[in-house]
Image (spheres, coloured by chain):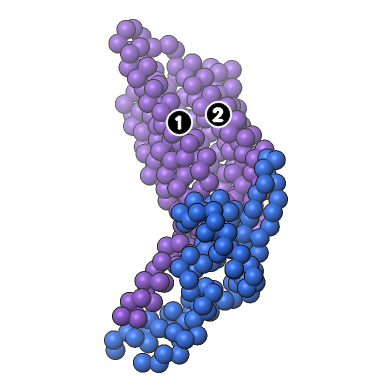
Amino acid sequence: MNPEPYLQLDRVIHEKGRLAIMSMLAASPELSFTELRDALGMTDGNLTTHIRSLQETGYVSVAKSYQNRRPLTTCSLTAAGRKAFREYVNLLEQIVQQNRPK
Amino acid sequence: METNWAAEQLQTIRTLMERSAVYRRALAPIMLFVGFVGVLAAAIGFLFHFDSPSAFEYLWTDAAMFAFAGAVIISRRQAFKAKEPFLSPPARRVVQAMLPSWLAGLIAASVFRLLAVNDSQLFWWLPPIWMVLYGLALYGAGFFTPRGIRLLGWCFFLSGLAALVILAIKSMSGPLPPLIYAHYLMGFFFGVLQLVYGAYLYLTEKGKNAA
């Protein structure tokens, strides 16, 4: 078995919580902090921590605005984040293909 | 074992992506248009005395078709503007969720047309049945749209049920009012209520326009 694809998996995305955030954002132009929190059942603190590390890696951008006079935080994938996510999924597919019985 | 893990991981990603891809086209213009058609149909029905069962049925099925066509055009324009496919996966899911109830509404109209061609008393049952079915359609669609649509679905569903109960009680105690008053019921729910909801969306939607 070729271990290479597994070793190439992006460690930032590989974490369960961050992968969930990336997956949600990959299918949507943007999602609010509340939408992400409710959909993933995370606590505010947990979600903030994950988003911060994704933001620091340059995978997620965070925008703050106001809606109905309430602060609104929206998250979206950056181009780099989209590319990293696509590569991560491709590697997973390679692993599946590689180990499929012939 | 690693294959299982990778396959499970891919499945999780797919599920999360599907859950995230909700229908996000701006619903305010669609609701406002559909509500406007409802009010207009009720006004036409009342002012021009569409009080025979067949006139009532034709007016409202035509209004429904017109509203549907308008909604398709509005949402197509939004998709075109956003350079996205009109029938995106979430849009397809919304249509699939609403389709059974729409068809049931059309079938109900045809059945009433056949059975109650001259019986305006019997025709009174059609509006609440349409309300219940429309409520179910909105409720189904609400799983793939922002949450408010499901609430509107509940509103139609419960009001339709209440109207059915009231009709049942009234019909036991005497004849029902002339069919022309059913335009009030239709106009209020399919017109005013949707206009109000559309106005609410207009004021609160953040100009989102992506499927």
Q: Which comes sooner in the sequence, label 1 or label 2? A: 1
The answer for which chain carries disc 1 is B
* Disc 1 target residue: B156
Residue at the farthest top position: B174
From this view, report whether residue B181 is shown above or below residue A55. Answer: above
The x and y percentages for residue B55 are 47, 24
Looking at the image, which is closer to me, B91 or B154?
Answer: B154
* Residue B135 is at least partly visible in this image: yes
Q: CA distance from mark 1 to mark 2?
A: 9 Å
Q: Amino acid at mark 1?
A: Phe
Q: Amino acid at mark 2?
A: Leu
The x and y percentages for residue A58 are 65, 72
Mark 2 is surrounded, within 10 Å at the Cα level, by few (under 14), some (14 to 19) or many (20 or more) other residues, namely many
Residue under the point 51% across and 27% down: B189
Residue under the point 37% across and 26% down: B161
Helix, strand or loop at mark 2: helix
* Disc 2 target residue: B193
Q: What shade has chain A been given?
A: blue
